Amino acid sequence: MVIDMNFINKDFKLTSYKDPYPYIVIENFFEKEFFKNIEKKFPSENDFKSQKNKINRMNYDTSIKDKLYEQLLKKESEYKELHNYIYSDNFINYFIKLFQDSIASEIKNENLKDILKYKIKSDPFETEKILSKLDIKENSPDEILYPRLDLGMGTLGYGKNTGGKGIHVDNPQRLISILLYFGGYKHIKGGELRIWKKVNDTLEISNIIKPTPNSLVASLQSNISFHDVNPVTEIDGTRNACYIAISSNNKIWKNL
């Protein structure tokens, strides 16, 4: 499939961080008109309430095979374009390239399996439930990397009993995690992504990233990639976002 990527802003601003682990922040990721339509057409809270939340990453979520998600793809061209982009080799290769030096270093230091030799399976592989470390095999003969896209909404209290439920690292099969912020609120207190750094035997906040509309945060999800969501204590509207993961079908990170 040929992917038209004209909806990505050619003049976006990328800031790269190496400490305490590799991550990037991209401002104005989508073209202005494309993002305007993405934000405008994002499902309402009632839309999310119309179906059972099988994901439970945010207060409300929807993903491939859900009725809401499939309706969105049929009705809204922008979401179909986004879906086609995420489920493509171009997408996976682009983000691996952004982190290529860090990935090579982790492989060399034997903290990460040689995922550069893995096959890319860009068609939907992980559908409905999120595969946890309990669902994967230690070593699978068919080693692949695959994407996953979830649309979600955070409301009052998001980040306390959802959003990872506090400071955590992702599953050991996760290579890169990506957040795309879609706005949805007039006022919000909390809801920031917090980057944590291990100092001796304690964790300290290294950076706080606001959920600014049309911004993207991507991070290499190593075994020290500690992060959480600052719980939402006030909100006028909802915290709308898109969570994307590039994962493997087996455990790729070394235990600490």
Image (cartoon, grey):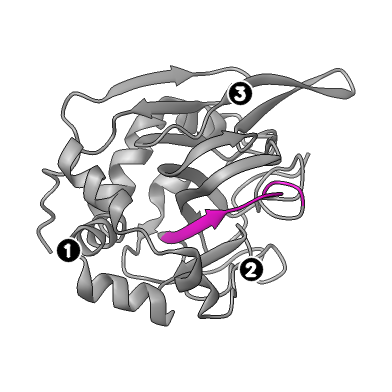
Q: Which residue is mark 1?
A: 77
Whether 219 is drawn above or below 14: the answer is: below
Which residue corresponds to the image point at 44% horizontal and 59% vertical from the top-left?
151
Question: How far from the left and from the top, in percent, is residue 84?
Answer: 23, 62
Answer left or right for 35 relative to 15: left
Q: Residues within 10 Å of mark 3 (few under 14, many from 20)?
A: some
How many labels, in total?
A: 3
Q: Amino acid at mark 2?
A: Ile
Q: Secondary structure at mark 1?
A: helix
Whether 88 is drawn above or below 129: the answer is: above
Q: Secondary structure at mark 3?
A: strand
- Looking at the image, the residue that sits furthest to the right is 201
Q: Which residue is mark 3?
A: 208
Question: How far from the left and from the top, in percent, is residue 145?
Answer: 42, 57
Q: Amino acid at mark 1?
A: Ser
Task: Specify start and end residues of the magenta stretch as a single range.
Answer: 148-160
Question: How far from the left and from the top, in percent, is residue 191?
Answer: 61, 38
Query: Magenta span has 82?
Result: no
As measured in the structure, the alpha-carbon distance from the residue carrying label 1 to the one carrying label 3 is 33 Å
Which residue corresponds to the image point at 41% horizontal and 31% vertical from the top-left?
99
Q: Secondary structure at mark 2?
A: loop
- Return the residue nearer the eye: 144 or 193: 193
Whether 147 is drawn above or below 128: the answer is: above
Which residue corresponds to the image point at 45% horizontal and 72% vertical from the top-left?
47
Q: Residues within 10 Å of mark 2 (few under 14, many from 20)?
A: some
Which tag, 1 or 2, sits closer to the chain's start? 1
Q: Which residue is mark 2?
A: 136
- Return the residue nearer the eye: 122 or 38: 38
Which residue corresponds to the image point at 47% horizontal and 62% vertical from the top-left?
143
Which tag, 3 or 2, sits closer to the chain's start? 2
As measured in the structure, the alpha-carbon distance from the residue carrying label 1 to the one carrying label 2 is 34 Å
Q: Amino acid at mark 3?
A: Ile
